Amino acid sequence: MKFQWHRWAWLFRRFIYLIMLAAAHSQFAMAQTKPVYDAASAGRLPIRVYTDKDGLPQNSVEAITFDAKGYLWIATQDGAVRFNGRDWTTVPM
């Protein structure tokens, strides 16, 4: 059986074509993605200050933690509060 170069050359050309097509597609896909907004790269992080006017028992905070449900707990000398992202719930102690 004689080796047929034209069949292997055709297969090799198709393989190279597919590699080039995949590379071009990945470059196009990367160009189409929107950059992720990173607040730290903007130079200033968004900060909101809460006081006793917002629902804290006292302005002096002793401890801060998150629970398993995602609530923010803040302990003050006058009691603890839970923050759900919108409202403060006071827990007297």
Image (spheres, helix red, strand yellow):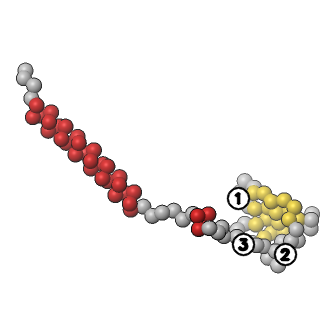
Which residue matches tag 1?
70
Q: Which residue is mark 2?
A: 52
Q: Reading the chain from its start, which is encountered first: label 2 or label 1?
A: 2
Res. 91 visible in picture: no
Q: CA distance from mark 3 to mark 2?
A: 13 Å
Say what amino acid the circle numbered 3 marks.
Arg
Indicate which label's residue lies in the foreground, 2 or 1: 2
Residue at the image position 84 percent from the left and 59 percent from the top? 63
Q: Residue furthest left?
A: 2
Q: Residue at x 82, y 74 (%)?
A: 51
Task: Classify residue 60 by image quadrant.
Answer: bottom right
Residue at image coords 78%, 73%: 50
The front one of 52 and 42 is: 42
Marks 3 and 1, how far apart at CA: 18 Å
Residue 54 rendering spot, x and y as whole percentages? 79, 76
Is 90 left, or right, of 83 in this rendering? right
Image location of residue 8, percent across then percent down: 15, 33
- In the rendered image, residue 70, in percent from the top left (x then y), is placed at 70, 58
Q: Determine whether the residue tagged by mark 1 lies in a helix, strand or loop.
A: loop
Mark linked to residue 48: 3
Residue at point 59%, 68% (across, down): 42
- Left or right: residue 2 versus residue 83 is left
- Disc 3: CA contacts within 10 A as few (<14), some (14-19) or many (>=20): few
Image marks 3 and 1: residues in contact by CB distance under 8 Å: no
For badge 2, the amino acid type reads Asp
Task: Choose between 70 and 7: the one closer to the eye.
Answer: 7
Chain-order first, disc 3 or disc 1: 3
Q: Nearer the viewer, residue 4 or 86?
A: 4
Q: CA distance from mark 2 to mark 1?
A: 22 Å
Q: Residues within 10 Å of mark 2 (few under 14, many from 20)?
A: few
Q: Which amino acid type is shown beneath numbered disc 1?
A: Gly
